[in-house]
Amino acid sequence: MRIIIFGPPGAGKGTQAKLISEEYGIPHLSTGEIFRSAIKNGTPLGKEVKSILDAGDLVPDEKVVGLVEEELKDERYGDGYILDGFPRTVPQAEAFDDILDKKGKTLDAFLQLEVPQHELVDRILTRGEGRSDDTPEKIKNRLAVYRQETEPVLNYYKKQDVVKHIDGVGSIEEIFGRIKKTLNNI
Ligand code: ADP
């Protein structure tokens, strides 16, 4: 199964993606985690993107697309995967479609986690992961970037008839239950 999990910062994409990965035995590919681990390890990529992540801005499309394309060449992604944090712009979505086309593959589901705006900031501030981009100012910027650059990705996928709306309010288990119900029906 090839799945995209989509939603604003703080919606719980990472948490649900991990559960999906375990339940369905497919690898979880999180672009945010790739960048954070590169920064932590002081790799060239990490040095390149650190100030971008710190500001809550987006890494350039070319960079992200190249990275995802390379990563997906690994055979462990052969039976499917869950993408978290990618595609985050319409050009990234178009590039991802090309990647799938070239492999003769299709997307099975685009899970849209729906969480009301007012809950997002509270959730990020209380999750206490200690991320350098989890300060009120930076969260504000990430939400603005989401609205401007990322939300249009939803309309892009609506044209493909793969979008599944998931109510993202409730306990982790409740939300995961909704996701399983949805995925077991496709
Ligand atoms: P969140 O959804 O909570 O903002 P992520 O872990 O998905 O967290 O992303 C953290 C940061 O990593 C983003 O603010 C951005 O700087 C960078 N990033 C992650 N994925 C992408 C992407 N597909 N395109 C551009 N930048 C990205």
Image (spheres, grey):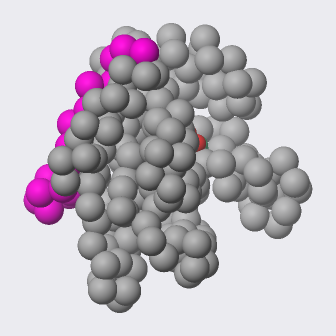
Quarter assignment of residue 109: bottom left
The quadrant the N terminus occupies is: bottom left
Q: What stretch is highlighted in magenta?
A: 156-171
Q: Residue furthest right?
A: 42
Tally of marks: 0
Q: Residue at x 64, y 25 (%)?
A: 134
Seen in the image, is 99 located left or right of residue 21? left
Q: Which residue is drawn at 30% across and 86% down?
A: 104
Residue 157 is covered by the magenta coloring:
yes
Tell me if residue 81 can be seen: yes
Tell me if residue 152 can be seen: no
Percent coordinates x, y for residue 97 in the rendering: 31, 74
Seen in the image, is 51 located left or right of residue 174? right
In this view of the protein, which residue sits in the foreground, 178 or 61? 178
Percent coordinates x, y for residue 172 in the rendering: 46, 22
Residue 84 is covered by the magenta coloring:
no
Percent coordinates x, y for residue 183 in the rendering: 27, 47
Percent coordinates x, y for residue 95 in the rendering: 37, 74
Above or below 32: residue 48? below
Above or below 135: residue 184? below
The quadrant the C terminus occupies is: bottom left
Above or below 146: residue 186? below
Seen in the image, is 99 located left or right of residue 42? left
Q: Which residue is drawn at 36% across and 20% down?
A: 174
